[in-house]
């Protein structure tokens, strides 16, 4: 791990104020304010096109900001890009491995870009290949690897310089459950060691598992911010009652439940009742003569929050 | 059944170059003219100044000697290119041949379509040099269009055998060496720029075995109107033999590749 | 040969910051070509074939030519020009098709820019690699020329740095032009520029043969390259050399500048 952190513990690793990104006339990121502190895992959630990757690329100091203030390790990416990037690991959304090199060479040369001595690169490459279970493919070209293997290699590559800050843009997309869990464990270990993690994901369970804090983005702006638990408490009820009902029973549910139904959502295939107590709500409905074809009481999840905040319909 | 498929292969190949046709046509017309002006006129002046050079060139000026030979070398270059990268492209990257033959599996149609395409491509390629020959007064003549036609089998004599080799390849690594050790030496030593009598005696039979030397002779004799019947028969026989062997090899190799 | 290369890259880390970071791109290319060294080695045969052809064929047809009142064998006259042209062609290939593939298809530079390397360092590194390759080819060319007895002056050793300069100028300009390429079809224009230069740069006959049109020839950058290499090969020093060097240096500087700026705007979106 980095011997002498240039940031004091209370100074944010990333600080953004009014951050914007424009592509021509289109504005992908429209004024973000957030800070990420040392050692935490910070997540960005948001539907497709929300601006997550655009933001990640600005943080990784390759994409210039259009407006606002961005500081990483207290440095300005516009002037100190190389110094910032030297202390950072990046897993981009799409794998961009070096197709002309082998699996092992991909890691070695990447380490060389960070000025690591050759022997060190080789040693770390071996260790990382073991970690992502690609040691037996070390001499293989990248092209014939499966999608998940390429993803694992990209993740291994991002760790070669033992970064203080790791940016992961949808790291587990395309990974099988085993690989996903192994990665989660490793990310947890890294966090324990003081590495700051910033990730985007479309898997709510992943965000709940990993993130200390997260923001939900939509159309380039932040629509909510907090811890996973805090967001659920704030934007959802404790429980959700899912009902499959005959068409005639659908209307008037809210009327029967009164205060017990904070919100009722009428979906094509089922009805969702957001409620502090699902079993009590179900009992009341049964007593009122409504007999669901199927019913399920569950704790509300981050997914409920996400859908609540960003809507159920597909945005562009 | 096979004819329409052949036509579809031909069409497919044509469409891929059609988009760039303006550049391609403009370049294939101007490049030979530039080369001829530079080499034929400039070097020609040096050659023609020297006493005795005309004798070794069979009484021709250097421009008259070189220009028709370029019909044959251009055909060789085009034919050998078309039989390598684009053919591998069809098998491997774009998989057009496999796509084309997916319904009724018919490697024969693919081979025929390619032969048709190469011919088209060679005709287009011969226009540039042909035009240059017609523009320059000392090379103008009725033999030029016939010589242009004669360059087409020369190109096919390279394309067909090479395509059968390409059909057995998984990647393009062998193409640069072919270019370097076969095509370039033939271009330089194959009798286009100077008589092969200049070569060491041991190398001359090698030149005689290649389709290029025969193509060069054929185009040259035709364009200056100095055809000798017996020689012409030999030239045509050698070139046809290469095309025939290449065709058979293609049929076998494409069959194996597509049906595997 | 790969021995030479790895020795060279081992020396490079001693260089300061930017240069050292650029050298990482060279290191990568060495890694890639280590497996396909046969292609590079087989490239050494090309000069041999060309030189032999000139000697066997044209030597017999042409005999001697007169340059500035001095009569020399035709092969001796053309060999330096072929060496200069080879330096141009190698640099152009490395800096156009090769770079375009890495830029647009392999997205290599997107990867590299996530590391401490910046766009200018990437551009410089790729040009360094083109030069390194050019250096190896030039040496091979020189060996062929000497072995075939086509060199008359020991000054011909200076043809190697001259070829490096040619390679530098063309690689820089080639890279600058490549950043404007929209697709593979645009590369058809490259030979449209290099072929006329190859034919009309006092390559195959003296400048005097062009008469009143000589000034057009003198616009061609390859002409200045040919003149430099020929001066070295014939041991023929003169003030003109300063002009040739200056021309190529200016071309290199303009190319580097454009390539750096353009790569930044292309990659830093
Ligand atoms: N280089 C670019 N040029 C123009 N527009 C861009 C560019 N990159 C991104 N955009 C646009 O910016 C918007 C946000 O894209 P971005 O990739 O940041 O979304 P995202 O949140 O990462 O989405 P996803 O979940 O699909 O990965 C999109 O509308 C996209 O079209
Ligand atoms: Mg994204």
Image: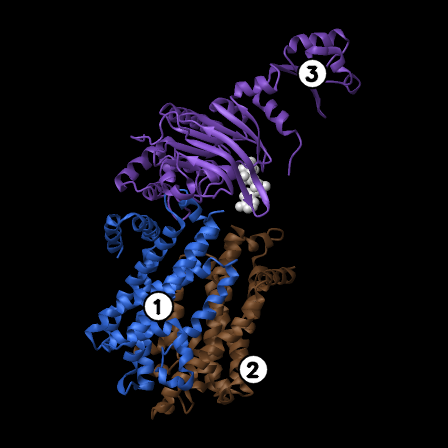
Chain colours: A purple, B brown, C blue
Nearer to us: label 1 or label 2: 1
Of residues B155 and C193, the one nearer the viewer is: C193
Nearer to us: label 3 or label 1: 1
Residue C184 x/y as whole percent:
50, 59
User: Judging from the image, what secondary structure is the residue with disc 3 in?
Assistant: strand
Q: Residues within 10 Å of mark 2 (few under 14, many from 20)?
A: some
- Residue B144 seen from this side: yes
- Residue B174 seen from this side: no
How far is mark 1 from mark 2, CA to CA?
44 Å
Circle 3 marks a residue in which chain?
A
How far is mark 3 from mark 1, CA to CA?
81 Å
Q: Which residue is mark 2?
A: B145
Of residues A275 and B205, the one nearer the viewer is: A275
* Residue at image location 32% in from the left, 60% down from the top: C131
| Quarter where residue B184 is shown | bottom left
Circle 2 marks a residue in which chain?
B
Kindly identify which numbered label has been placed on residue C248.
1
Kindly identify which numbered label has been placed on residue A294.
3
* Residue sticking out furthest to the right: A248
* Residue sticking out furthest to the left: C154
For the residues tagged 2 and 3, is the chain the same?
no
Residue A303 x/y as whole percent:
59, 24
How far is mark 2 from mark 3, CA to CA?
84 Å
């Amino acid at each position: 791990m980095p011997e002498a952190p240039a940031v004091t513990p209370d100074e944010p690793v990333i600080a953004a104020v009014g951050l914007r990104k424009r592509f021509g006339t289109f504005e992908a990121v429209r004024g973000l304010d957030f800070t990420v502190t040392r050692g935490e895992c910070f997540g960005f959630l948001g539907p497709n096109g929300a601006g997550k990757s655009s933001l990640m690329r600005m943080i990784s100091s390759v994409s210039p900001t259009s407006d606002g203030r961005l500081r990483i390790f207290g440095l300005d990416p516009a002037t100190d890009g190389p110094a910032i990037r030297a202390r950072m690991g990046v897993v981009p959304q799409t794998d961009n491995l070096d197709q002309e090199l082998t699996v092992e060479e991909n890691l070695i040369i990447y380490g060389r870009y960070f000025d690591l001595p050759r022997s060190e690169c080789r040693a770390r490459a071996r260790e990382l290949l073991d970690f992502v279970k690609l040691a037996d493919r070390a001499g293989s070209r990248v092209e014939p690897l499966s999608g998940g293997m390429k993803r694992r290699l990209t993740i291994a590559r991002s760790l070669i310089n033992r970064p203080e800050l790791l940016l992961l843009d949808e790291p587990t997309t395309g990974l099988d459950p085993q690989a996903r869990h192994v990665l989660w464990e490793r990310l947890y270990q890294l966090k324990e060691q003081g590495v700051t993690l910033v990730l985007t994901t479309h898997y709510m369970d992943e965000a709940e598992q990993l993130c200390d804090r997260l923001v939900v983005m939509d159309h380039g702006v932040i629509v909510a911010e907090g811890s996973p638990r805090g967001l659920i408490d704030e934007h959802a009820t404790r429980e959700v009652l899912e009902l499959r009902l005959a068409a005639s029973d659908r209307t008037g549910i809210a009327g029967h439940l009164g205060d017990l139904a904070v919100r009722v959502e009428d979906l094509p295939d089922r009805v969702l009742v957001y409620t502090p107590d699902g079993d009590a709500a179900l009992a009341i409905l049964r007593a009122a003569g409504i007999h669901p074809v199927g019913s399920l009481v569950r704790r509300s999840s981050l997914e409920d929050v996400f859908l609540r905040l960003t809507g159920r319909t597909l945005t562009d | 059944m096979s004819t329409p498929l052949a036509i579809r292969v031909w069409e497919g190949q044509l469409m891929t170059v059609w988009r760039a046709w303006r550049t391609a046509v403009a370049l294939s017309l101007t490049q030979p003219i530039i080369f001829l002006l530079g080499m034929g006129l400039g070097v020609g002046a040096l050659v023609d100044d020297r006493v005795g050079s005309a004798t070794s060139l069979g009484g021709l000026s250097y421009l008259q000697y070189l220009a028709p030979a370029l019909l044959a070398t251009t055909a060789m270059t085009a034919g050998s290119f078309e039989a390598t990268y684009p053919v591998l492209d069809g098998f491997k990257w774009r998989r057009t041949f496999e796509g084309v033959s997916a319904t009724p599996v018919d490697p024969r149609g693919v081979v025929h379509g390619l032969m048709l395409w190469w011919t088209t491509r060679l005709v287009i390629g011969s226009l540039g040099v042909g035009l240059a020959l017609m523009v320059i007064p000392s090379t103008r003549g009725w033999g030029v269009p016939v010589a242009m036609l004669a360059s087409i089998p020369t190109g096919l004599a390279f394309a067909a055998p090479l395509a059968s080799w390409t059909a057995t390849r998984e990647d393009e690594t062998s193409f640069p060496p072919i270019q370097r050790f076969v095509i370039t030496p033939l271009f330089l030593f194959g009798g286009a720029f100077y008589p092969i009598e200049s070569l060491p005696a041991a190398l001359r039979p090698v030149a005689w075995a290649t389709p290029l030397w025969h193509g060069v002779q054929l185009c040259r004799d035709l364009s200056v109107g100095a055809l000798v019947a017996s020689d012409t028969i030999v030239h045509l026989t050698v070139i046809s033999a290469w095309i025939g062997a290449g065709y058979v090899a293609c049929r076998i190799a494409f069959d194996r590749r597509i049906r595997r | 040969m790969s021995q030479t290369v790895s020795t060279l890259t081992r020396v490079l880390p001693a260089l300061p910051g930017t240069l050292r970071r650029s050298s990482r791109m060279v290191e990568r290319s060495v890694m890639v070509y280590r497996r396909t060294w046969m292609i590079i080695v087989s490239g050494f045969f090309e000069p041999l074939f060309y030189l032999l052809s000139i000697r066997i064929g044209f030597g017999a047809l042409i005999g001697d030519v007169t340059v500035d009142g001095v009569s020399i064998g035709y092969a001796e006259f053309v060999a330096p020009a072929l060496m200069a042209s080879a330096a141009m062609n190698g640099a152009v290939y490395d800096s156009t098709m090769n770079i375009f593939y890495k830029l647009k298809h392999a997205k290599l530079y997107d990867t590299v820019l996530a590391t401490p390397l910046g766009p200018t360092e990437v551009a410089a590194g790729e040009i360094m690699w083109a030069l390194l390759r050019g250096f190896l080819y030039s040496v091979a060319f020189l060996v062929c020329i000497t072995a075939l007895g086509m060199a008359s002056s020991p000054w011909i050793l200076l043809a190697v740095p001259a070829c490096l300069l040619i390679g530098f100028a063309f690689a820089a300009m080639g890279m600058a032009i490549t950043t404007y390429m929209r697709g593979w079809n645009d590369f058809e224009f490259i030979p449209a520029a290099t072929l006329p230069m190859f034919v009309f740069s006092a390559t195959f006959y003296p400048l005097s043969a062009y008469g009143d049109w000589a000034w057009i020839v003198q616009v061609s950058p390859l002409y200045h390259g040919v003149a430099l290499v020929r001066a070295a090969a014939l041991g023929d020093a003169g003030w003109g050399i300063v002009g040739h060097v200056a021309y190529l240096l200016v071309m290199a500087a303009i190319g580097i500048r454009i390539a750096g700026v353009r790569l930044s705007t292309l990659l830093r979106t």
